[in-house]
Amino acid sequence: WGWTCSPRGVIDQLIHLSGKPNDPVVLFIDSGGGSLHTAITLHDIMKALPYPIHTVASGLAASAATLILAAGTTGKRFIFPHAKTMIHPPRLKGHIDADEKDMEIMKAEFAKSKNTYIELIAKYTSKQKGEIEALIAQGEHWMNAEETKALGLVDHIITNFSDIGINLN
């Protein structure tokens, strides 16, 4: 089965599949990222489900999408040889209509979410939080498949679907 959908659609499909707890789900990721809040929500849903979730970077897994890639079941996080990943300090996007007091509140909440992102990336890479902070301190940190694996965001570089247990015959 395969879906191309919004993060909310992915969450709905993952919950729908929870009726088959012995079958792993393969989540192919080709995304430039998006909302940090949404990525953390998807992460939490993935971790609450009773079945393994195999993640595969099939093109680009950048920013928030990198967190989802790394959150897959340990040992079952994959990347194709020409896929890329990118981590960076999360950013507030879009027009914000708020007074100064509300801006301070939003800034504090954003700082908490940024800290959560960095802590989760550190957890999944087995790196110290300070190492991840230093890595992204200068902005976007782009990685090829080898670099992504070396950092610990994925476990395996794959060249075909049978490497992840998908038989297309």
Image (tube, helix red, strand yellow):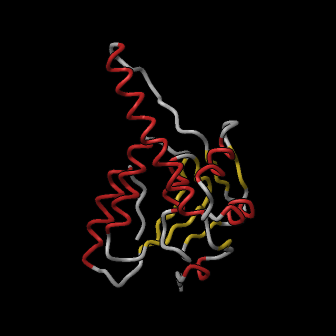
Task: Give x and y (percent) for residue 118.
Answer: 53, 49
Relative to residue 6, is residue 57 depicted above or below?
Answer: below
Relative to residue 76, is residue 130 depicted above or below?
Answer: above
Is 158 left or right of 21, judged from the image as shown? Answer: right
Task: Give x and y (percent) for residue 53.
Answer: 44, 72
In the rendered view of the protein, which quadrant contains the N terminus? bottom left
Displayed quadrant of residue 48: bottom left
Which residue shows up at 47% across the image and 29% down it? 93
Relative to residue 64, is residue 154 depicted above or below?
Answer: below
Task: Give x and y (percent) for residue 146.
Answer: 75, 64
Is 31 left or right of 12, judged from the image as shown? Answer: right
Taking depth in this image into account, of 119 and 18 the one nearest to the observer is: 119
Task: Give x and y (percent) for residue 76.
Answer: 54, 75
Which residue shows up at 39% across the image and 53% down it? 5
Which residue shows up at 68% across the image and 66% down it? 149
Displayed quadrant of residue 66: bottom right
